[in-house]
Amino acid sequence: MRDFSKYLLENIKIRFPIDDIVVLLQILVVENIRKSGLDLPFFGINELDKLLDIFGNDKKCGKETYSKITDPVETRIEWRFFKRLVNNNYLECNKQFWNYILKDSFFSMNYPNIKKLAYIAHVLPMSRAI
């Protein structure tokens, strides 16, 4: 059993390296946003820039070109307002918040790029476990 646990932990570390997308997406965790306090204007900017390097540019793989998932300029604008919205209005735990937000049409219209990142945050861990 000890060897199995050791192998499992090593496998998890390989699948989820420290600088992985999963870590970057933690800027979307409600508690992390609310804990930022006076640093709210600066919270998540570096992580968002890295995420936009990944999801905000077209990608070429062989002969295929894949369109960007998010618009970098619009996402940065949305992020500024989204952080304030969360910090000022939401006390729910992260799971309840995102269950509500991902279904809400107002949020879809006003924060479409943040919503795309949230979907990625919810799907990525499951897809990597396969």
Image (cartoon, rainbow, N blue to C red):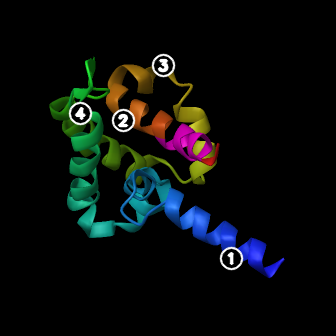
- Camera-side residue of 122 and 102: 122
Give the distance between the C-alpha atoms of the residues marked 4 and 3, in whole angstroms: 23 Å
Task: Residue under label 1, please give it.
Answer: 6
Q: Does the stretch in magenta take in 97? A: no
Residue type at numbered disc 3:
Ser
Residue 105 has which mark?
3
Q: Mark 1–mark 4 contact, CB under 8 Å? A: no
Residue stretch rendered in magenta on the structure: 121-128
Q: Is residue 122 magenta?
A: yes
Q: Viewer-nearest of labels 4 and 3?
A: 4
Residue drawn at x 20%, y 37% as measured from the top left:
77
Disc 2 versus disc 3: nearer the observer: 2
Labels 2 & 3 near each other (Cβ < 8 A): no
- Alpha-carbon neighbours of circle 3 within 10 Å: few (<14), some, or many (≥20)? few
Residue 80, located in which quarter of the rendered image?
Answer: top left
Dominant secondary structure, magenta: helix
- Residue 115: where, in percent of width, then height? 42, 31
Q: Nearer the viewer, mark 1 or mark 4?
A: 1
Q: Cα distance, mark 1 to mark 4?
A: 37 Å
Residue found 37% across the figure and 44% down from its top: 85
Q: Which residue is drawn at 40% across and 57% down?
A: 20
Amino acid at dot 1 = Lys
Amino acid type assigned to the residue bearing label 2 in the image: Ile
Closer to viewer: mark 1 or mark 2: 1
Query: Which residue is identified by label 2?
Result: 114
Dot 1 or dot 3, earlier in sequence: 1
